[in-house]
Amino acid sequence: MPREQEGAYPGTRNPTHDAATCDDNGAMTRRADLAEFLRARRSALSPADVGLAPGIRRRTVGLRREEVALLAGVSVSWYTWLEQGRPINASDDVLDALARTLRLDLIERDYLRALAGHPPRRAIDPLRDAVAPELQCLLDALDPCPAYVLGPRWDFVAWNNAQRRLHPSIDTLAPEERNLVWLLFADAEVRALVGDWELEARRVLSQFRAETTPIRDDPAVGELVRRLRDASPEFAAWWPRHDVGGFERRTRTFHHREAGLLRFDHQQLLPAGEPDLRVIVHLPLVGDDSIERLQSVAIVSTPQRSGG
């Protein structure tokens, strides 16, 4: 039976037609993203995936709303409101039921919770644009391995000399362009540098979406997404898919103009006491001379220790 009470459902508030006008733009954006995400995941499942008979005269791609509501134990009307982006709040139990019904993995479950307005797992300061001297010392100690620090918006906030050799223009980029996702999708030099570009771009986009959902209200994140939609047809096509993923250790390849084909072990470190930041480092592979060849490249740009 649907989880209903008199005039409400457990863990929810009744929707009102004028409530949206009282919400800030960030809340409205999250509700719209939540609606898109639910529709996309519902469309990706077949009745057989969830143990239902397909029936006859079926025109719906994927599951019907009625089927999702039945399996999750909620009212069809309530679930419809959720997919319409209405201002209703869902409890943890309801979100868990929807996640199980839609076969979401752990990253997608966290994404669902963030879109539903639940607190993030960690405090995030989107204004981070610099690092402590100790963290810059860590980057320098990692040289000759390329290493850099990403802020909560995925801006480059610090890097070492090896990263300057790998990406020579990083020092001279305008602040609004010193962002990993922007460069990957909108910068011709970086697109040519990155090996297996489409695979890497899709992976990075899914991670960026998952990591920045808790700060989706930040105007700078919204502006970055709008700029990327205009600048990159691939971003415009892939962003509405709501693919989310976590970091994966992997081999990264680069087509460097001077050093040739470079291959590294791609790793991520989480600095103690710095939950907003990520240290990305490219380590040498056994028997590979990429680090040595990259070391031979001269640094021609003016050193700059942080983005700002």
Image (spheres, rainbow, N blue to C red):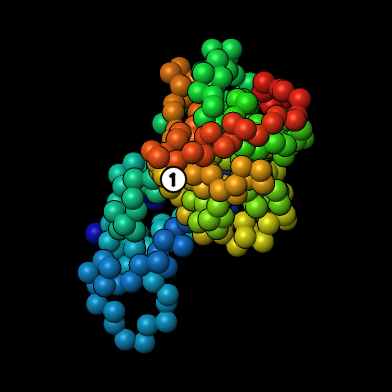
- 105 vs 132, left or right, is left
- Residue 179 quadrant: top right
Q: Taking the image as drawn, is residue 284 in sight?
A: yes
- 8 vs 241, left or right, is left
- 41 vs 142, left or right, is left
- Residue 265 in percent (x, y) is at 43, 39
Reading the image, the residue beneath label 1 is 251
Residue displayed at 27% across by 61% down: 71
- Residue 141 in percent (x, y) is at 51, 18
Residue reaching furthest to the top = 133
- Residue 139 in percent (x, y) is at 54, 22
Q: Quadrant of the C terminus?
A: top right
- 152 vs 94, left or right, is right
Q: Compare residues 264 and 40 and report the one nearer the observer.
A: 264
Q: Compare residues 229 and 26 and report the one nearer the observer.
A: 229
- Residue 101 quadrant: bottom left
Q: Is residue 49 above or below residue 88?
A: below
Q: Label 1 crowding class (10 Å Cα cut-off): few <14, some 14-19, many 20+?
A: some
Residue displayed at 55% across by 58% down: 198
Q: Is residue 98 above or below residue 65?
A: above
Count of number-bearing discs: 1
Residue reaching furthest to the bottom = 57
Residue displayed at 31% across by 57% down: 103
Q: Quadrant of the N terminus?
A: bottom left
Residue displayed at 70% across by 43% down: 223
Q: Compare residues 296 and 122 and report the one nearer the observer.
A: 296
- Residue 219 in percent (x, y) is at 67, 38
Name the kind of residue labelled 1 in the image: Thr
Q: Taking the image as drawn, is residue 74 in sight?
A: no
Q: Compare residues 15 and 32 and report the one nearer the observer.
A: 32
